[in-house]
Amino acid sequence: MLDINSVLVYYQAMACEMRHCDEFITDISLQPVTYFDDNLNHSSFIDHMFVSDSFRSHVVAAEIYDSGTNLSDHRPLVLCIRCI
């Protein structure tokens, strides 16, 4: 369920002709998780990438990068693009 902040961000992005790239995440073996807190046993998909409509056709893939060396509670997102 989306909260009001998520809805507001979505409509603001649409107004700026920006679209999220969530569907380009290539590893769908698990539910996408970009935030996790081991102490609270909590995880969610709260980080997203946005690109302009005109640039979106150059997106090839995206992934959530979990190297094991990341000291943050957020996992980096990587966007793969075709050279223009």
Image (cartoon, helix red, strand yellow):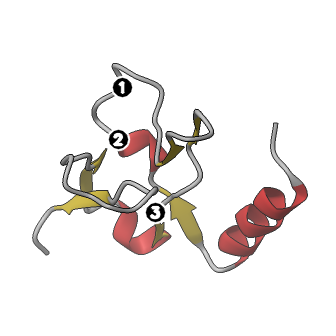
Q: Secondary structure at mark 3?
A: loop
Of all residues, the one furthest to the bottom in this rendering is 16
Label 3 and label 1: CA atoms lie apart by 17 Å
Q: Please provide percent x and percent y for residue 23.
A: 44, 40
Contact (Cβ within 8 Å) of mark 2 with mark 3: no
Corner quadrant of residue 56: bottom left
Mark with earlier residue (3, 1): 1
Residue 70 position within the rendered picture, expressed as x and y whole percent measured from the top left: 27, 58
**Residue at 82% in and 63% down:** 5
Give the quarter of the figure containing the N terminus: top right
Which residue corresponds to the image point at 46% horizontal and 48% vertical from the top-left? 34
Amino acid type at mark 2:
Ile
Position in image of residue 30 (x %, y %): 40, 22
Outermost residue toward the top in this view: 29
The alpha-carbon separation of the residues under discs 2 and 3 comes to 10 Å
Q: Is residue 65 left or right of residue 1?
A: left
Q: Residues within 10 Å of mark 1 (few under 14, many from 20)?
A: few
Q: CA distance from mark 1 to mark 2?
A: 7 Å
Residue placed most toward the observer, 68 or 33: 68
Report the amino acid beneath label 3.
Answer: Met
SS at circle 1: loop
Crowd tier of the residue under label 2, counting other residues whose Cα lies within 10 Å: few below 14, some 14–19, many 20 or above: some
SS class, disc 2 = loop
Label located before the other in sequence (2 or 3): 2
Circles 1 and 2 in contact, beta carbons < 8 Å: yes
**Rendering quarter of residue 39:** top right
Residue picked out by circle 1: 28
Disc on res. 68: none
Q: Which residue is mark 2?
A: 25
In the rendered structure, the answer to whether residue 69 lies left or right of residue 40 reads left
Residue annotated with mark 3:
49
